[in-house]
Image (cartoon, rainbow, N blue to C red):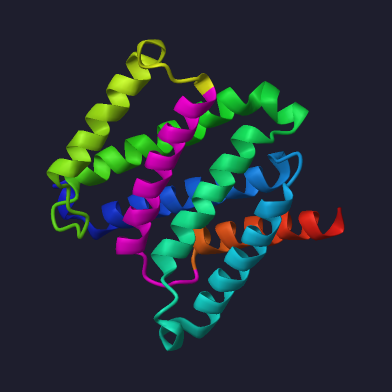
Amino acid sequence: MIRKQPQFLQALTGLMMAGIALYSLVVAFAVKQVPLQFGYILIILAALLLARLLAGFRLWFLFLRLTLFLSMAALVYLVNLYPQDWFGEISRLFDYAVFAVLILTIAAGMRFAENSRFDVSPLDFLVILMLLVVGIFPQQIGLSETLLRLIIEFVVLFYAVEWVLKHMRSRWNLMTLGVLASLVILSGRFLVG
């Protein structure tokens, strides 16, 4: 059966790592400008992530999960509120492609990974139900399209990061390197100009 194959979990994890890394790297170039307050946050996040990756368990108090969640939140916020002109034209297609892959791999992981360390709680079902309601009835709830995109992207990326964190074999992987590269690029762009 497919769920008993360790290669299945590895493939799902690899696909999620690639999706997160691709999203992060595209964001690094799709952001038009880095506001002053976010520039310093990005520099701090890049330094914390690099320190955690280099030092490993010696800096156990620097939580990798928290650093990655904050990094993804910053990237989602920046690309949705400060997009380059060229990205505005393709952002919808890019989002559909990347987030469709992430949503499908998360769903497959939840459904088929028998001995997965990724437990689904009633809160997860509540979050998914709320996303469906918000996605189907945004006008009735009074959400703008930008806010709706922010919410959906936050939730999907947080679940994908959580999956990868629970199944990764090394802290040096495609996801952590992609996020780190994005933070470094955006920090550099902030410092240069």
In the image, 126 versus 37, the foreground residue is 37
Q: Is residue 148 left or right of residue 89?
A: left
Q: Residue furthest bottom?
A: 58
Q: Is residue 10 left or right of residue 72?
A: left
In the image, 2 versus 76, the foreground residue is 76
Q: Residue at x 24, y 59 (%)?
A: 6
Q: Position of residue 81 (x, y in %)?
A: 63, 34
Q: Residue furthest right?
A: 193
Q: Residue at x 72, y 44 (%)?
A: 29
Quarter of the figure with residue 169: bottom left
Quarter of the figure with residue 23: top right
Q: Position of residue 187 (x, y in %)?
A: 72, 59
Quarter of the figure with residue 62: bottom left
- Eyeballing the image, is 21 above or below 105? below
Q: Main SS type for the magenta part?
A: helix
- Eyeballing the image, is 48 above or below 113? below
- Eyeballing the image, is 50 above or below 56? above
**Numbered circles on residues, count:** 0
In the image, 94 versus 137, the foreground residue is 137
- Eyeballing the image, is 47 above or below 6? below
Q: Position of residue 56 (x, y in %)?
A: 45, 82
Q: Position of residue 141 (x, y in %)?
A: 36, 16
In this picture, which residue range is highlighted in magenta?
A: 146-172
> Is residue 144 on the magenta stretch?
no
Q: Residue at x 50, y 20 (%)?
A: 144
> Is residue 159 on the magenta stretch?
yes
Q: Is residue 100 left or right of residue 77?
A: left
The answer to whether any part of residue 22 appears in the image is no
The answer to whether any part of residue 192 appears in the image is yes
Q: Residue at x 76, y 39 (%)?
A: 32
